[in-house]
Every structure is written in structure tokens, then in C-alpha cells.
Amino acid sequence: MDKDGSKIIFSGIQPSGTITLGNYIGAVRNWPLTAKMGRGIFSVADLHALTVRNKPSELRARTLSTFAILLASGVDPENSIVFVQSHVPAHAELAWVLNCYTMFGELGRMTQFKDKSKQHSENVNAGLFTYPALMAADILLYDTDLVPVGVDQKQHVELARDIALRFNGVYGDVFTIPEGYIPSFGAKICSLTRPDKKMSKSDPNPKSYISIVEDADTIIKKFKSAVTDSDGRIAFSPEKAGISNLLTIYSTMTGCTVEEAVSEFEGSGYGDFKLAVGKAVAEGLRPLREKYEDLMNNKDYLVSVMEQGAARAAKIADRTLARVYKKIGLFKG
Ligand code: AQP
């Protein structure tokens, strides 16, 4: 809760690739909407992106472009705070403290840890394991009430709550207990090539995801090659993961219901349907893409917004960290 009683809404995104349609529908497009309920605080979570090996120049470039995408998606840096995680050292500092209040067993049960350990079996590092403690620090530093995320992050938000409750149980009401804000529809957009898996920005196969700033032709081409099934019916059901995913994308991008989309395409072939979904997405993302291109041509502006965002975020975060350090007994002369 903010000083004036308004709700605090916090979320972040890793610059581990270019923001996908999944990230956008499941999380980012809800950020400016939820920010209207109170004060939004949004971050490019670059420290989180270190759990995999990055080429330093690419990580730097992706951090800037992710920041630009957030602004192009409607996050307003006047009304909300938008910043890069590593520019506010309190995140790493509180993460260490919270590591000491997070149980080994809890971290081991995290689905994302299990999935990513399989995916990157050559580099199962301690950061990958303790990622949720850093995410808890991100959230708890700002007395966050709501965390708008996709369904894959639900478990991590729940762990942040558990950590906060455990800490408060020992030291009193230090942290606000956050709640996840998961959209009722579109919280898990699936891969275009493997519709049983979620769409991910770090997927090695670029055909599996739509980057929200790629050109219209590429977007349409990727939808044309999206994996479907062989029964030829346009229907929404668990057995038809590919078609259901495309219906979800179509309805979230056009604002119609799934039932309306199903009746609109009744009798159409898959080819026409996929083309229509591709066109709707390419058209729906056009304003965002144009704004993004403008912003990327104005790096000085982006850097100045980043600096202001970090200063505003640090003011709040440092206060919370000082409160925590005092409660746990760290000596200050
Ligand atoms: N496929 C998805 N559908 C809906 N929401 C999604 N999110 C991610 N994928 C989908 C939501 O996007 C936000 C930012 O995600 P993140 O960068 O913190 O990491 P992630 O959840 O691990 O997303 P990716 O794209 O899969 O990244 P990589 O490939 O690096 O692991 C979160 O709110 C997330 O729920």
C-alpha cells in the first residue's frame, strides 16, 4: 500500500529474449491497466536473466529494447515507476536476506526450477535455484499489493507470500502480503510449434514464438506455419491445443469472445483461420511496434527515463531495506 492508501502494483520481466506475444497477453498489456488501480512499479529484471549465460553486449541491448517495449506497451513513466532492476541495489541486498528465510525444500518444489534444470542441464547454478527469493525481494521491497503475472509465475508469487508471512511471523508486520493478479483468459499462451508447451522468449526455435516487435509479414508467416491438428474443426477444447491457442490469441487481440471467434470461422479451413489470426495480431501490434521504433531512435530519452525510474524506485526500496536490516539486528552506528 502506498502512503496515500492507494494500491501498489509491481511486476517485472526478464530481458532473456525479445518480449513475446505470450508475455504481452499474459502480463505486460495488463500492467498499464492494473496501474490505474493505484501506483504501478515495473521493472526490467536483468539480474534474473543472469541464470543463463548471456553475451554481455546482447544482454545490454535486450535490456534497452525491453525497456522501450514496456513504454511502447502503454506503461506511463509519469504515473508509474519503470526501471532496470540492477540499477536499484536493494533488490540484490534484500534477496540475500530472504534467501535466509526461504527453505531448500520450497525452492526445490518450484516447477520452473525443475523445468529449467532439465532445459539447461549443463548449467544448473545456484541462481536458478534461488531465483524465487530474488523475485520475492523485487515484490516485497515496494509494499506491493498486486502482482500482475502469467500463470507460470503464480507459484513464485505464492512463495513470495509465504516468505513474507514467515518473516512477519518472527518480526511483526514488516512486509505487505502480496497477491497475484492473473488474467482469467490468456494467462498461458502456448508455443506455435508445440502447443502443449507455453510460448517462451528464450525458446531456441524462433517459429515457436511471436516477438511483439517483429514485422507484419514475419508474424503472418509464423501463424501460417503454426501447428494445429488433422480433424479440420475450429473448436475450443483441451484435445485441440493448437486451435484453442489460436482462438485464445485471436479473441484477446480482437476483443471478441472465443464463442464469437468460433462462429466467425465456422466452416473455414485451417489455412484461412491461421491467416486471419496472423493478420489480427500483426494489425493489433502495429501501434506498439511503431511507438517502439520511435523510442529506439531516442536512446537519450530512454536512458533519462531509466535514471529517473531508478531514483524513484530506490527511494522506496532503500526505506524498506533499512526497515528490514533494523528488524533483523544488523548494526548501524
Ligand atoms: N506463454 C505465456 N503466456 C502468458 N504469460 C506468460 N508469461 C511468460 N510466458 C507467458 C508472463 O510474462 C511475464 C514475464 O515473464 P519473465 O520474463 O519473468 O519470465 P518467464 O515467465 O520465464 O517468461 P519466458 O518468456 O518463458 O522467459 P524465458 O524464456 O526467459 O524463461 C511473467 O508475468 C510471465 O508469467
Image (spheres, rainbow, N blue to C red):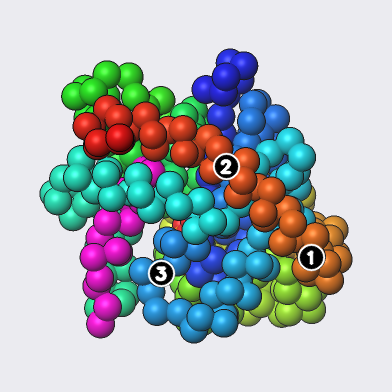
Callout in the foreground (2, 3): 2
Image spot of residue 242 (x, y percent): 53, 64
Could you tell me the amino acid type at mark 1?
Asp
SS at circle 3: helix
Name above or below for residue 298 compared with residue 7.
below
Compare residues 295 and 109 and report the one nearer the observer.
295
Q: Which residue is found at the position 57% from the left and 19% from the top? A: 3
Image position, residue 145 (x, y; %): 49, 28
Q: Which disc, if any, is residue 300?
A: 1
- Kindly identify the residue that appears in the image at 45 percent across and 66 percent down: 49
Looking at the image, which is closer to me, 138 or 308?
Answer: 308
Dot 2: within a 10 Å radius of its alpha carbon, few (fewer than 14), some, or many (20 or more) residues?
many
What residue type is disc 2 on? Ala
Mark 1 and mark 3 in contact (Cβ < 8 Å)?
A: no
Residue 2, position as x, y percentages in the image: 57, 23
In the image, residue 118 lies in the stretch drawn in magenta:
no
Q: Which residue is mark 2?
A: 313
Structural crowding at the residue carrying mark 1, measured as other residues with C-alpha within 10 Å and reported as few (<14), some (14–19) or many (≥20): few
Judge whether 171 appears above or below 281 on screen: above
The residue stretch that appears in magenta: 122-137
Location of mark 3 (residue): 50
Mark 1 or 2, nearer chain start? 1
Q: Measuring 78% from the left and 68% from the top, which residue is drawn there?
A: 299
